[in-house]
Image (cartoon, helix red, strand yellow):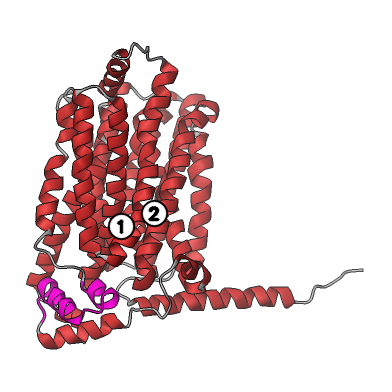
Amino acid sequence: MSADADVPRGAVRFLYGVGALVSLTSIFQMGYSNAYVNTAIDEFKIYLNRSLETRDVTMTDDTYTWLWSAILNVWFIGFAGGSLIAVPITDTIGRKQGLLIGNVLTLVSVVLLTVSIIYDVFEMLLVGRTIAAVASGIAMCALVLFLQEISPKHIRGSMSFYAELSFVVMNAVGAVLGMSMFLGKHLAVLVGVAAIPAIVSIIAMIPLHESPKFLLLKKGDNLSAKAAVKFYMQLDDENCDRLLESMATESDETHGSIRTLLRVPHLRSGLLLGVLALQVTASIWPVIYYSTEFLRRANIEYDLAETVSSVMLVISTIATVFGMLLMERFSRRNLFIFVSAINIGALALFVLGAELGKHVADGFKYICIVAVIIHGISYSFATGPIAWFLTSELVPIDHRALAQAIALTVNQLIAMCLTFVTLPLYNIIGSFTLFVLYVIPGVGVLIILWFRLPETKNRDISEVVADLKRVRTRVALQTEESISMPTKVQI
C-alpha cells in the first residue's frame, strides 16, 4: 500500500482548503482584470479620452483602437516575461516564495492602476497592467508547482484544477463588477478591489510550509521535507519516510538546463506535448475579449450579446466545479482530448450559425449563442484546467519549473499574436477567422496528442517518462521500417 492511501480525510479536506485559499487569492488579478476591461469598456474609453484631453490631444477612432489594443495585449508580453522569471525564483528559493513575490508585485500593480485612474495617467495604467501580468505569470507558475507538489497522487488532478477554477471564477467576478450597475462607473474602485485578495494571499502564505518535493529534491533538506509532509498530509513517521522514499525516485539524472530539456528526447517530448496541449486553449482569449463583438456581428441584439457573454462566464464557473469533482474518475488523457474536441467543435458550430444566419435564415444566428456557451463549458470543464498543469505531469522535477515556464511563455506569445490579428481578419473574412486561426490548428494538435500523449492520472513521473520513451521508440522504429521498406517499381 502506498503512503498516499494512508492520507487521512481530515488532511485531504485541509489540502483542499489550502488550495482554494491560495489559488483564489493569488490568481484573482489574472482573471478579474481581464474581464472587467470587457464589460467596463465604455467607461475605459471615456477615461482614455479624458486622459488625452489633459494633454490637448484629440482621441480619434484609430488612436483609441491602437491604444486600447496595446493595453489589452501588453498582458501577454508581461505574463510571458513573468513565466520566465518564475523559473529561477521557484527553482532556487521555492514555490512558496514565488507565490509571495507574485502577490507582492500584484499589490504594487493595483496601487499603480488605481493611481492611474484617479489622476488620468494612461501611461501608468499601461505600466500597472504590465506589472500585474508579470506578477500573474510568476504566481501561476509557482501555484501549479505548489499545488502539484503538496498533494498526494489521488487528489493531484483535482487540486491542480484550482488554478483554472480561480481564473474562471475571477473572470465572472470581474465581468459582473465591471457592469455599469455595479462598479463599471467607478473605475478607481473597480481596479482597487484587487488589493484585498493580494493582501489576504500574502498573509495566508506566511504560515504555510514549502513544497515537500522542493525541499527534498531541490534543497536536499530531509528534515524540512518531512515536516512539510506532516503539515500537509498529517502522516505518521513510518508513512512519511515511505512517501519521501517514493518522492526521491522523481529526481532525474540530468541537469535542469534549457539545453538538456531540449536535447534529451523524453524531456523534449514532455515539453512539446505540454505546449501543444496549451495551444488548444488559445481560443479562450478572443472569446473573453471579443465574445460580445462576435455575437453582435452575427446580428445578435446588443443587450442579448452582453448578457450571453456574462452568463457564459457564470456557467463556465459551475462547469469548472463539476470538472474538479469528476477529474479523478476518468482518464486524464482521454478526458482532455475528448472535451477539447467538443471545445473546438463549438467554434466550428459558431461559424456555421453565423454563416447560415447571414445567408440562409436569420434564425440560425442563435446557434452562435449555443456555440459560445458550449465553448465556455468545455473549456472550463476540462480543456483549460488540464492544459494548465499537464506539462508539470510530463516532466521530472529537475526540469519541471523550466518546462512549465517555457510552455506558458510560448502559449502566451502565440495567444497574443492570434488575439491581435483576430479582429482585423474578422473584418475581412468574417466568422471564418475562427476556423482558420483556431479550428484547423486545434484539430491538428488533437491528432498529435491522440497518438503521443501518455496517461498521467495517479502515476509517478517515472512511469510517465517510461511511456514517453516507449512512444518515441515505437515512432522511431516505424519511421525506420518505412524508410527501409523496398519500393515496388512498375514497368
How many numbered marks does the figure carry? 2
Q: Main secondary structure of the magenta part?
A: helix
Q: Nearer the viewer, residue 489 or 229?
A: 229
Residue 27 image point, x, y percent: 23, 49
Which residue does the image show at 74% across and 77% down from the upper left?
485
At numbered mark 1, what does the secondary structure look like: helix, strand or loop?
Answer: helix
At numbered mark 2, what does the secondary structure look like: helix, strand or loop?
Answer: helix
Determine crowd level at label 1: few under 14, some 14-19, many 20+ residues with C-alpha closer than 10 A: many
349 horizontally vs 203: left or right? right
Q: Nearer the viewer, residue 92 or 402?
A: 92
Q: Above or below — where is 285 with respect to 466? A: above
Mark 2 and mark 1 in contact (Cβ < 8 Å)?
A: yes
Q: Above or below — where is 83 with respect to 190? A: below
Which residue does the image show at 26% across and 43% down from the upper left?
31
Q: Amino acid at mark 2?
A: Leu
Q: Amino acid at mark 1?
A: Cys
CA–CA distance between discs 1 and 2?
8 Å
* 43 within the magenta span: no
134 horizontally vs 61: left or right? left
Which residue does the image show at 15% across and 46% down from the upper left?
198
| The quarter of the displayed image where residue 370 is located | top left
Q: Does residue 487 appear anywhere in the picture?
A: yes
Residue 335 image point, x, y percent: 36, 61
Write down the region rendered in magenta: 212-235
Q: The C terminus is located in which quarter?
A: bottom right
Q: Does residue 153 appear anywhere in the picture?
A: no
What residue would you read off at disc 1?
141
Q: The N terminus is located in which quarter?
A: bottom left
* 222 within the magenta span: yes
What residue would you read off at disc 2?
408
Q: Earlier in the sequence, mark 1 or mark 2?
A: 1
